[in-house]
Amino acid sequence: MPMNAPFLRSGPRAASMAAWTLCALLVPCTAYSAIYHSPFVFKLLGYALAGSFAETLFALAVQRRRKLVCSGSALTAALLAASAPPATPFLPMLFAILVAVWGARLPWRGAALRFNAAMAGRFFLMLAYPAAVVAWGTAAPDTISTATPQELYRTDGFMLDWHTVLFGRVGGSWEGLYTLVPGSPGETWPLATLLLGGLLCRAGIVPWRTPLAFLLSFGIATACLGNNPLFNLFSAATVFTAVFIVTDPVSTPMGKGGQVAFGIVVGAANALIRNYTYYTEAVVYAVLLGNLLAPWLDHAAFALRGRQLGRRRPEQ
Amino acid sequence: MLRKIKIDWAGLARIQPLEHPFPPPERIFPGIDEIDPQRFPDFLDEIGLVGMGGGGFPASQKLRAAAGAHTLVVNGIECEPGLTIDQSVLLHESLWVAAGAVAAAKAVGATRMVLAVKKDSTLLAELALRYGEFEIVAFSDRYPAGAEKLILEKLEGRRPPPGVRPYQLGYLVQNAVSLRAIGRALIDGIPVVERPLTLAMPSAGFHRNIIVPVGIEIRQVLEAYRLPYDPCIHFLAASGLMMGHEADPETAVEKTTLALLVLPRDAAWREERPCIRCGACNTACPLGLHPYALVERIRKGRTGGDPFRMQMTECFLCGVCSAVCPSDIPLVQQLERGKQCL
């Protein structure tokens, strides 16, 4: 069989891209487990294995081929686990992973319209097991237990200084009694997550336009709506979303312009939903909405480029 | 997402001498007395000159079309990464290149002569000594800087419209090796029977610029340097890493063979996987096109529509999209098919 040019390759390979992102995701989760003495990281690895196994089964049953290591589905499952409370029971999480891998990820392969599988699974979790998603810690009388400080901000206008949320442990008068962290395990260290995102961008594994557009658009929209942009950026899932969710290649537009537009739409939608509804994070809805728009954005970018080129052509 | 394509070949930075492993050709052509714009293209036909930058387009037709051009561009930018043959020819055979360039400029009536080379301070200093009458313009050393389209973009200040050839804008772009062939015919009376090329085997650290007779078997070239070529582990890439093709050692060196590269088979082996829609091809495309969207349309046969035709015309098949594709999709081969739909 003849070799085809080009004989050079540049940039990462598809299989290693998901694996590297998974490694990046493991960093904050391992730190979370180590510092707060939680077995969470082992659960996360188990869920990742479950996701990978689900794809193996799917490949065997539907595509009739053997595929052992499925880093993409493993990443989907791990993202799903990292974006939910660590105490989420096993069965709901397993169902969510199966919905994500079998329902949202694999059957849609090759289609123009794709949904972010982790977010689809999380959407299922929210609909089917609403109690499991918000179950955070143990609620005792006179305490409030929530997944993120967002909830307090939303209901009581209670706001932390933005720089205290940057480093994982939220300082204040409650220290000694409780440990406050700004989000789910994957979202605990916004600063570290940002750094990891920068590294992934540098390695060419994730695009930089989508997350940047998302963060900027989200920050500006939040500020315009009269909320504190920095607190909103660094608490809850915003940075996690920017680094791990909107950078998902399959469900986001391919072109540069499309990626920027996608980031802007998702960021603005997220800020709007947070402001006007009772959802405190609303990443799921914003991202799924953006996914719906992605094929159209791609198509528009393609047509626009064609028109630009046509305009350069001199009049005959 | 495109980083500069890295080549870990030893000794690429220094400019190597030009070697003549085979005996020189005999003088068989009488030469011409005067450069006459009407008769000069016929002279090019007589010496058998085709575009030696890899295009293979008959030079006489190009010259006829470019009659009245105001600028002659000597394209000394290596078209492919890892080749140094254009630089070598510019440095070591400057007499022939300059003579050919002056003759071609005179034939089309060009008053400005531009020497387009890669950004490299030592090379620029050396060239300034040899090409006093040329305007030397330095280009980026990132592939595909040597494409006519991108040269014109820099000279004109804006990119030429899709489908417009350089001569329509008053430029004649000729490869340095083509001009060397003109000069050789004018001065020595030797037609296009030689091909300067880069012979390289990165795994053995071998990289030479040599002049070989056109039509010689590739096997003989390899044997002249005793290269440890083994068809089981190596394959032969003719004309370069990005736009080249696999060659059989039994075939002959052609006028358009820019290089002969002996490469390890397993390193170049690629297996197509499904697209993950990462957009690496879009980001990397030097022309800002949407390669995968084009390929999708070609595969589905939806090749009508203005946006498709414009983008397909603009594409010059540089192969960067294929090189960066994380799923190893042969995008450039599909785009080649798409060119035929136009």
Image: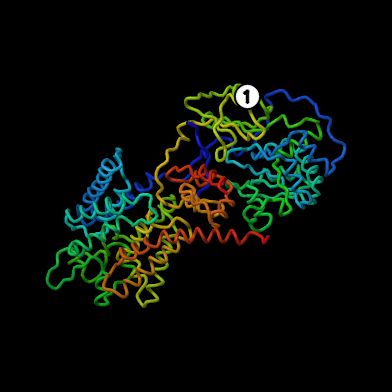
Question: Depth check: A199 or B168 in front?
Answer: B168
- In this rendering, the count of numbered labels is 1
User: Quadrant location of residue A216?
Assistant: bottom left
Q: In this view, does A247 lie to the left or right of B117?
A: left
Q: In this view, does B80 lie to the left or right of A157?
A: right
Q: In this view, does A291 lie to the left or right of A31?
A: right
From the image, tell me which residue sits under label 1.
Answer: B217
Inspect the image, locate mark 1, and give the three-letter code of the amino acid beneath it: Glu
Q: Is residue A103 left or right of residue B220?
A: left
Seen as rendered, the residue at the extreme right is B33
Q: In this view, does A31 lie above or below B233?
A: below
User: Quadrant location of residue B245?
Assistant: top right
* Colouring method of the image: rainbow
* Residue B278 place in picture, x, y as percent: 42, 52
* Residue B8 place in picture, x, y as percent: 52, 38
SS for callout 1: loop
On what subunit does the disc labeled 1 rest? Answer: B
Disc 1 packing (10 Å; few <14; some 14–19; many ≥20): some
* Residue A233 place in picture, x, y as percent: 35, 67
* Residue B31 place in picture, x, y as percent: 83, 33
Q: Give me the residue at 55% from left, 38% from top.
A: B241
Q: Give me the residue at 76% from left, 36% from top.
A: B45
Q: Give me the residue at 26% from left, 42% from top.
A: A61
Question: Depth check: B18 or A72 in front?
Answer: A72
Q: Give me the residue at 24% from left, 76% from top.
A: A155
